[in-house]
Amino acid sequence: MKVGFLGLGKLGLPCALAMESKGHTIYGYDVNDRVIQSIIMKKLKYKEKWADELLYKSKINLSGIVEMVQNTEIIFVAIQTPHQKKYEGITRLPNERVDFDYSYLKAGIQILADIIKDNGQSKIVVIISTVLPGTIRKEIKPLLNEFVKLCYNPYFIAMGTCIPDFLFTEINLLGVDDVDAAEKVKKFYSTINEAPTFDTTIENAELIKVCYNTFISTKISMMNTIMEVCHKLPNTNVDSVTRALSLCKDRIISGKYLTGGMGDGGGCHPRDNIALSHLSRRLHLSYDWFENIMIQREKQTEWLADLFIEESKGRKMVILGTSFKPETNIITGSPALLLKNLVEEKGYKVTVFDPYVDLNVTYTDEQEESLITYFIGTKHEIFKHFPFKQNSTVIDPFRYIARRNDLKIIKIGNNIE
């Protein structure tokens, strides 16, 4: 296939070379003449695994942008979305927070869209630049025209190993705007790698990309905290600790617990974090990571409490489920009970019911005159068929209660209808 690349910098060129290595013909363009000259001279100023070898054999067509549009079926846009050095993490965290700079991306897209329109033929344009959620719809789509068939396709690659990361990626992530274009891009990737394609909304794809990076940051930060603990505790070794954790592939290194819902609970998690916070203070760690975990759990539950109160509008409030996890009657460390306590702390009365805990109680709202606002506190299977009072509200943080015409169901974290 003939493929175009708008942007041949440290992201675009390695990916273009990787695609070329799979037999595709590449037409590339970059506004920076020094970038073009380095490709012509086949000499890069940065170290990139496999790049020198592939560049030496490369036959990339370094055309003008008009020629690139005329000769290609899919055009990948790899234009930088930079930031100032103070946001690189090489200095202290600044007080202010800013978005990425989209001026280069917008300018490039505008030029590309106009040339595609002048060419008079529809082209698939695939943006691979990193952006924050909402950017493509707000900043980029208004620049397009009917000849541009858009996809958003960020990569899970790291500078220095872009080519192997791209060729052996875990998933091909595709934010879909045009269904036919997305299908063609999927078919194209079947020639590049064997990874599954995860297609979703553009906003989801934008969010998945940055969350992926932040997830890695979270793992590193957690393990560096453990390293500091081991440096201050006799007879401990961080490499032994992390090696043991890496073998736990059922719950730690797996897809388990990667779902939104209530906070964790039980007889171990909250108390262990609080105890480790105590240890952190005793050892004078540089940062109390474990306190941070508990604060997030509490703050998020308080946000749920405020949402519960707001949606209740003075009606009766009922929490369904008080055990700390489904299909058990253990309430130790229950996040649902934390929710109850925070609602009551704010001056509101709330009823709780759990069929596994309240074994001798039959719950019914049949005699209740007013409507009710229910909150699913535990993901018990039985609540899928619970006799909710008609025309009431159900707040579902687990997004597992089926839609019903006689109920207002709020699926927390799902804004796709």
Image (cartoon, helix red, strand yellow):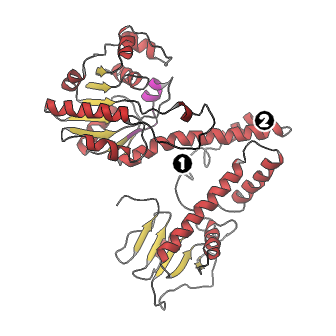
Q: Is residue 400 magenta?
A: no
Q: Is 290 displayed left or right of 110 in the figure?
A: right
Q: State the SS at label 2.
A: loop
Q: Is residue 164 magenta?
A: yes
402 to 260, vertically: above or below? below
Q: How many marks?
A: 2
Mark 2 burial class by Cα count in 10 Å: few <14, some 14-19, many 20+: some
Q: Which residue is mark 1?
A: 255
Q: Residue at x 67, y 70 (%)?
A: 331
Residue type indicated by callout 2: Asn
Tell me the tag on residue 164.
none
Residue type indicated by callout 1: Gly
Give the position of the N terminus as an image quadrant: top left
Q: Looking at the image, can residue 378 be seen?
A: no
Span colored in magenta: 162-173
Q: Is 254 displayed left or right of 175 in the figure?
A: right
Direction top: furthest residue: 41
Tell me how far mark 1 sits from mark 2, CA to CA.
Answer: 27 Å
Quarter location, residue 32: top left
Q: Residue at x 43, y 12 (%)?
A: 53
Q: Position of residue 338 (x, y in %)?
A: 64, 68
Give the position of the C terminus as an image quadrant: bottom left
Q: Is 408 displayed left or right of 337 in the figure?
A: left
42 to 250, vertically: above or below? above
Q: Which residue is mark 2?
A: 237
Q: Looking at the image, can residue 268 be seen?
A: yes
Quarter location, residue 91: top right
279 to 241, vertically: above or below? below
Q: State the SS at label 1.
A: loop
Q: Position of residue 275 (x, y in %)?
A: 78, 55
